Image: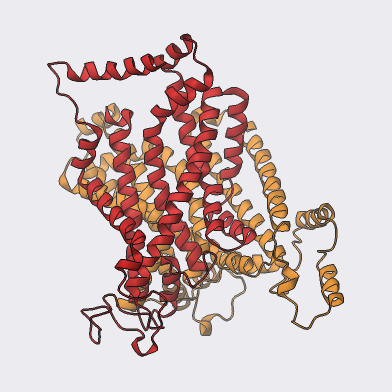
């Protein structure tokens, strides 16, 4: 089994190191050469640092109200206070500090929800794609029925049923979006299962599960990683929408969606309370998307050819 | 023909499945809808009476049977929060959402078609890369972000558009139907129509931009492919201009696959009305859905989900039929 995958890897290597052809750059080099991927990756790293070090980085307590300093505009506008870079909201809370603490909820949801959706969906997709026939038609039918349900309505319905809170938001995203992973992984697994190396591994007497997890899964992984990255962008938006509607975490935890809702209310007094988290959300969504597309371009052997 | 019958049968089954799922899901909700309606001093007897009034004391299966019997006749019960007939509320609110969704679809098709044709004409040039790059970003941005960005642009920075509502309340008189836009246009009340359109401008644009981006990507790829075909080459030899080649020759053959996916995307657009209507306080069924969930208004939620389900199924059915009609190989299937 080890030999089988080793030969396979070697196979592509010998092809690449043939003296007449140039060795294709490694995946890392390819990613680093992609400017969009580098910019998106740096931005997302910055977000992770902000989330982890929020108490150290944030200039103020995100919950500290000071009505004497309410609706201060961002620095650069008239009447701004230098200590409040992005201004304050109508309760005098520092917008920048709330923004920094808000990354915690956004990234928590992004990582956990996307990870769990990937786990559930790709597990079913692997089974459907590899075993085919009865299992495949059962899982595929389930996916079809599932996708007939409007996502926005289902997420609101689920959060209403499960009660508000972070766990419900995550559950809603997983319950809705596992189908994305299932469909793609199923197709990919079907394609891989027809490859020679799978037939060879089976001929060598490896069990079906050994072939599935040690041969096929690593080859499905690149597509899966790109898909997870894209899903994180979706999860961040869904969390923001549910926070905006008031169905996510309680309002004493700063979230981008919650800030957007507050900013929408005080739009004519303090537009920056809406603008700041909206820009953050926009940048995060675009970053996850560009990174996901870049990963798909660099990791997907089909696209690479 | 059998294809259509099969699809219709599947549609009915799907709708029944949706009904069961929603019904069961809502009955396991921990919160008691009656608890939200009673005044603090209500006695247990009062609460029991209220539960009986809304049929919430019956066994689950019986509740479902009663509800299903009514639903088949268009009777979804009485809304707990609005104290009105659910069907009546839905029919009053649905036209607002239909006008919004159809207008957004039309705008998305116009925008998507225009940009795809321009992009095809510019193929191979630097401008094409700019269009592709921008479109890549547009594809990533959901209607929620667009809606709020438009609020900042057209209600704050350049306050030219009304922020909330569907029409100035002073003008919302003398309508025979709830299709305000269609009715005011048909009866020649153009100042009223202009007022409605100014209210609809931001939500329509927010809903149409993500769909327009999808259309651009699909249609532009199909157009570029079609431009390489022999019949286009032949037309080019005949001396047709590039624009004429794209519009007359390539578009006809490129539009089919795009159309099928636009149908699916249209259902996403309608899903998007939920949050976009919320942002602009637009009185459609999307906004109503959020209120219904917040108020735990069971009968209303059930009615809304069935209505959304029906709309999605009808759109998918319509798209299947249009695609089949356009494709000669499927036409006689």
Camera-side residue: B283 or B4? B283
Task: Tell me the quarter of the image containing the C terminus of chain B.
Answer: top right
Does residue B187 appear in this view? yes
Work out whether B318 lies above or below B150.
Answer: above
Residue B140 image point, x, y percent: 36, 52
Work out whether A93 lies above or below B20.
Answer: below
Counting every numbered tag in the picture gives 0
Work out whether B187 lies above or below B9.
Answer: below
Camera-side residue: A175 or B203? A175
Camera-side residue: B287 or B293? B293
Q: Residue furthest front?
A: A56
- The residue positioned 30% from the left and 48% from the top of the image is A290
Image side of residue A229 versus residue B29, left or right: left
- Name which quarter of the figure residue B194 lies in: bottom left
Rendered hue of chain B is orange
Residue A163 image point, x, y percent: 61, 62
Rendered hue of chain A is red
Camera-side residue: A258 or B249? A258
- The residue positioned 32% from the left and 54% from the top of the image is A286
């Amino acid at each position: 089994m080890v030999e089988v995958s080793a030969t396979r890897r070697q196979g592509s290597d010998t092809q690449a190191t043939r003296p007449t052809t140039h060795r294709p750059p490694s995946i890392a080099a390819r990613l680093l050469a992609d400017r969009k991927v580098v910019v998106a990756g740096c931005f997302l790293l910055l977000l992770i640092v902000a989330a982890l070090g929020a108490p150290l980085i944030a200039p103020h307590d995100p919950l500290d109200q000071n009505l004497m300093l309410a609706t201060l505009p961002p620095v650069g506008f008239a009447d701004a206070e230098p200590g409040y870079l992005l201004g304050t909201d109508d309760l005098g809370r520092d917008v920048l500090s709330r923004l920094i603490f808000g990354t915690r909820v956004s990234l928590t949801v992004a990582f956990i929800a996307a990870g769990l959706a990937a786990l559930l969906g790709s597990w079913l997709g692997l089974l459907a794609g590899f075993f085919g026939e009865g299992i495949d038609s059962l899982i595929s039918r389930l996916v079809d029925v599932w996708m007939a349900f409007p996502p926005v309505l289902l997420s609101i319905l689920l959060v209403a049923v499960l009660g508000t809170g972070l766990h419900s938001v995550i559950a809603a995203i997983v319950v809705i979006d596992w189908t994305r992973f299932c469909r793609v992984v199923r197709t990919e697994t079907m394609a891989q299962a027809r490859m020679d190396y799978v037939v060879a591994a089976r001929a060598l007497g490896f069990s079906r599960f050994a072939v599935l997890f040690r041969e096929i899964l690593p080859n499905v992984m690149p597509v899966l990683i790109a898909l997870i990255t894209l899903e994180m962008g979706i999860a961040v938006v869904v969390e923001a929408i549910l926070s905006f509607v008031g169905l996510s975490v309680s309002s004493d935890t700063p979230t981008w969606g919650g800030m957007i809702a507050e900013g929408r209310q005080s739009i004519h007094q303090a537009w920056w309370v809406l603008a700041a988290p909206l820009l953050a959300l926009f940048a995060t969504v675009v970053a996850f998307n560009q990174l996901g597309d870049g990963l798909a371009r660099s990791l997907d052997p089909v696209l690479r050819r | 023909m059998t294809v259509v019958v099969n699809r219709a049968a599947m549609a009915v089954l799907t709708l029944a499945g949706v009904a069961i799922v929603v019904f069961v899901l809502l009955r396991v909700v921990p919160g008691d809808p009656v608890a939200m309606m009673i005044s603090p001093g209500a006695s247990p007897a009062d609460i029991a009476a209220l539960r009986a009034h809304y049929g919430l004391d019956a066994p689950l299966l019986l509740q479902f049977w009663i509800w299903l019997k009514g639903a088949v006749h268009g009777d979804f019960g009485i809304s707990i929060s609005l104290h009105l007939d659910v069907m009546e509320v839905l029919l009053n609110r649905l036209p607002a959402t239909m006008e919004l969704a159809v207008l957004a679809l039309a705008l998305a098709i116009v925008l998507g078609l225009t940009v795809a044709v321009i992009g095809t004409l510019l193929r191979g040039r630097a401008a094409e890369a700019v269009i592709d790059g921008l479109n890549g970003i547009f594809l990533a941005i959901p209607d929620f972000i667009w809606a709020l960005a438009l609020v900042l642009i057209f209600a704050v920075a350049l306050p030219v558009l009304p922020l909330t509502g569907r029409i100035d309340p002073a003008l919302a008189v003398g309508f025979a139907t709830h299709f305000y836009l269609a009715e005011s246009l048909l009866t020649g009340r153009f100042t009223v129509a202009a007022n409605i359109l100014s209210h609809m401008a931001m939500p329509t644009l927010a809903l149409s931009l993500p769909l327009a981006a999808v259309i651009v990507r699909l249609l532009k790829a199909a157009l570029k492919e079609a431009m390489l075909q022999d019949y286009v080459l032949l037309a080019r030899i005949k001396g047709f201009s590039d624009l004429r080649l794209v519009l007359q020759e390539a578009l006809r053959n490129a539009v089919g696959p795009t159309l099928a996916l636009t149908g699916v995307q249209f259902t996403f657009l309608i899903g998007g009305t939920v949050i976009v209507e919320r942002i602009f306080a637009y009185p459609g069924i999307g906004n109503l859905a959020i209120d219904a969930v917040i108020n735990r208004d069971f009968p209303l939620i059930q009615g809304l989900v069935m209505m959304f389900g029906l709309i999605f199924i009808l759109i998918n059915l319509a798209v299947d039929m249009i695609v089949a009609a356009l494709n000669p190989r499927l036409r006689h299937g």
